[in-house]
Every structure is written in C-alpha cells, then in structure tokens.
Amino acid sequence: MTKRLFLYLLGLAAFVGLLTSCAKEDKFTQVSSLSFSSTPSSLAPGQTHKLQVKAFPADADEPYTLVFTSSKPTVASVDAQGTVTAIKDGQTVISVSLKDRPEVKAEFTLTVETIRITGVEFTEKVASLFIGQTFSVSTRVLPENATESGAVEYTSSQPEVATITQTGYITALEAGTTIITVTVKEHPEIKAEFTLEVKQLYKAPKNTQFRKVGYFPSYRSITAMSDEYLQMLDVACYAFAEMNDDYTLTIQQPAKFQQLVDRCKSLGVKVVICFYGGGSSHEKYVKMVASPENRAKFIASLKTIVETYDLDGVDNDWEFPRTTDGTAESNLALMKDLARLCRGGEKQYLLTMAVTSGLYPGNRSDAISDELIALVDWLNVMVYGNFSETRPYQQHSTYSMLEKSYDYWIVRRGMDPRKFVAGLPVYGLAPGPPKRTSSASYATILRQNGPQAMVCDSALVVNSVHTTPYWVYYNGLPTIYRKVAFSVDKGLGGIMFWEVSQDTTEGASLVKAACDAARFEWKNKEE
C-alpha cells in the first residue's frame, strides 16, 4: 500500500468517526406518553385550577412544548400555562399534547357545576335585649362549600322595637317583640329567623319610705353600735368588699361580716354589700368597668357574695366616674348590669350608689346621668367632706351645703326627691392639717370636750399625729336636727350616716338623735 493510499484511508476513517459521533449526539430519548399529576373532577363557575403534567419515561430528554386545549372553551378555558378557568355549567374535555407530536397526549373530563345554596342559619343570635342594648348577629349559608353568591339581607318585622343593619347590627329601641330574618338575596325563599324580645330596662321602684342608712366599715368595730341604736336603722351598708387583681370580689373578714349580718337580721335591718373604687383600686375599677368580660367576672363574684350571705342588695361607692375620660359610660354599663342582677330574678334586691354632693357641678356630678339615676333605689349623697387647706375656718358639712346639694340634684337636675338620701357626718374634719390625719370621730370630740360639744359645730382636739390642739368642724345636735327637718320637709328619701362606728355610745348619740328627729318630723308631716 502506497503512502498516498494509506493517508486517504486514514482520513476517510476519521471522517466516518466524526459522522458517527455527531449522530450519537443528535439522538434523544423521546417522550412516549403524558399524564396529569392531578385533575379536578369538577369546578364551579369562576374557580380555577393549575394543571401539572408528567412526561414518560422519566429520563426522556427530548425537548418538547405542551399544548393545552378545551373541547368546550365556553364551559371551561385553559391557557398556555395549563390554568383551567371554569365558566359555566357543563362538561368539557381538557387535553394536553406535544406540539410536534400531537398523538402523544393525555386528557380528562371536567364537569363545571354550580353548588347551589340550600339553606341559611344564624350562628350568633340573641333571645332578648334591653332597651338601648346592641348585638351583632352572624350567619352562614348551607352547604358551606356552596359556590353561589352567599349575599344575604336582614330585616326586622317590627323596626320600632328593634332595627337591624345590613351588616347584622341590632339596636333595641322599645319594649316588645320582633322577628329578625335573614334571607339569601339570590333565593328569597331561603331564609332563617328568630324572635327577639326587647325588655324595658330594670328601673328602681318608687321609694316611699324615709330610710335611715348606716355605713359599717370593715376596718372598724362591728359591735361599736349597740343593738338599741342599730335597730333604728333601716339599712346597714358593709364597706367594703375588696376587688382582686382578676376583677372578682371577696370579703376580707368573713367572720366579722357574718356577725354583722346575723345581728342585723335579728333586728329586722336590711344588709347591703358596698364596693369601693378609691385609692389604689381606682385604676383597677377603670379597667374592670371598661370590659364586658371583666364586668361579668365582677358581677358573678358579687352575686355569689349576695347569695352566700343572703343579703338585701348592693351599693356602688365608686366615687370617681367622670365624663372626661369615658368612665361615666363604663360605670353606667356596670350599673345596668347590676340592675339586671338586682331586679331580674324572683327576689328583688336594693341597688344604691354613693355620689358627690354636687356642690361643684362638673365632670364627676355630670357623670351621674338621668339614666343611671333611674336604675337606683336611691343615691347616698355625701353632703360632707368639703375640705380646704387654705381656708382655716371652712366647715366641711354645713347646713347651707345641704341646701346647695338639694338645689343641684333636685332643683337643677330634676331628680325625684325620694332618690336623695342625705349624708350626715359622724365625724369632724379640720381644713388645715392633712386631711388623712385631721379627722376626729364624734365620740372623740365629746370625750375631749365634754357634753357641751354636742350643741356646737366646732371643737379643739388632739391626736397622736397632731399633739397641738387644732379645730375640727362637725355637726352637733342642733345642726343635725335642722338637717333632718329639712330632709323630711323637702320629701327626701332619707338620711345616711358615715359612719356609725364613730358615734358615741353614751346618751348623746348623734345617730339616735337623728333617727328620733326623723321619726318626730315624719309623724308631724303626716298629721
């Protein structure tokens, strides 16, 4: 073989090898079949579904493009990315195939079907409301997977009794019954309803008795007042039930309280429990009254106390609601809840509240609304405690203070006089020294000054803090007589003592004198 021939054959072999190599590189593993990873059996008009396609064999490396089609695009369409959109009720075949080899394909039948609404129901409703209350109902259509429009509308058969907005917000307007109905808009025949009773808010019955009310603080002796004087009272008010951090109430000295309850019941004196929101408790009371849940806890514990000790009512001595910080509205909500507690059952309980004298009308006095006044049996008006560190001879509970308090609550506010129970102090107070250390009990005043002090309204006293004699102002018997005569003459609801354990046990008892005067004045008025 010549050299030239050899080189020719070598070149030919190389060319053939190259061709073989190219052929191998151009040879792909073809897709033999297609399948859908998952397919919906049905869709509702407006629903969509993204299709996922698998190619077989898994190792196929043939480049390909998928083509999606719908046999009835008016029933359901499918885009180039495989997203199916249901349009109207019917059936269609959804297919996928290779663009270059349409014979390689997969398909499934899709049913487009509207899931009809068959019913509607209330998930939140209420059987009764009091006038002024509100409630938001909620509903759902059935079945829960219905694909029709679930729009509903609300109606009240007696809108003068209660109205309802199209968002389900009910407002109770007057006593009576109404039917609240929810209707599916697209199917007026599909509806649900319930009967709502709107009740008159519980109001206190008319007070026809001249009451004598005495406060018994838990930190004083329960036995300081003799049975002879105790039985002159109509109502004994135990102060105070303590509020815990969880907004429940407890009696701190249950044995002591039980002793008072037993004494009062044996003498025919009613007993009410008093709660107080002053001092460090104020902020807790603000949080309690602002929350329906917290008020519920509070009232549940109060109800337990009332039932456990077989009490005759409750007294709100939270003296700090204001119109300026929203607590007036919150306190009103609490009093409405208490009214339902006190008057919603078979046994009727007293509901009272201690309020300021109204000497300086403003956000505190205005916080006691006419609506609130209607709820209580009476107000224990604190016609005492007028204090000044700058006016050295200011008396804290003058006769004129009672006149001015009457003018505010009765003349200017128009309150029923029988709701006004006039507070009488059984203690003296100095305007100069710090208030918390300057008070003196009526018993102390008489003990340090002798019998003549009973006919005065001022006296010198000392105590462990103020060892130098200082003036205190109080109500001696003549002033007490005048106040009682005024209260009877004006047709007030009674007198109240803060507080009875500061009275003397001797014959010059201020409480006895006031009760005797009340009985005398009342008898004369009737005659």
Image: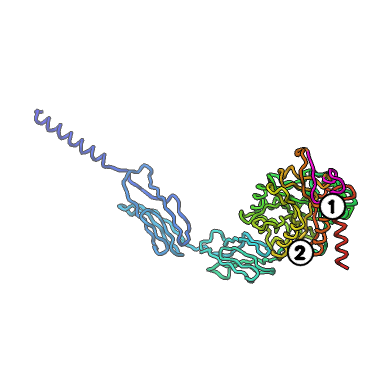
- Direction from residue 527 to residue 148 in the image, left or right: left
Along the viewing direction, whichever of 219 and 82 lies nearer the viewer: 219
Q: Earlier in the sequence, mark 2 or mark 1?
A: 2
Query: Mark 2–mark 1 contact, CB under 8 Å?
Result: no
**In the image, is residue 455 above or below residue 134?**
above
Distance, label 2 to label 1, CA atoms, is: 29 Å
Horizontal and vertical percent position of residue 62:
32, 45
Residue name at image x 46 percent, y 61 percent: 111
Q: Is residue 181 above or below residue 484?
A: below
On whether residue 450 falls in the magenta region, the answer is yes
In the image, residue 203 above or below residue 237: below
Q: Amino acid at mark 1?
A: Val
Q: Where is residue 385 drawn, in percent x and y?
A: 73, 51
Question: In screen coordinates, is 363 left or right of 311?
Answer: left
Q: Amino acid at mark 2?
A: Pro
Whether residue 78 is visible here, answered yes or no, is yes
Query: How many numbered markers are drawn?
Result: 2
Task: Classify residue 144 by image quadrant.
Answer: bottom right
In this picture the colour scheme is rainbow
Quarter of the image for the N terminus: give it. top left
Crowd band around label 1 with a 10 angstrom C-alpha radius: few (<14), some (14–19), many (20+): some
Residue 256 point in image, percent of width and height: 83, 44
Span colored in magenta: 445-463
Q: Which residue is mark 1?
A: 455
Q: Secondary structure at mark 2?
A: helix
**Residue 30 coordinates in the image, percent (x, y):** 33, 46
Q: Nearer the viewer, residue 441 or 240?
A: 441
State which mark lies toward you, 2 or 1. Answer: 1
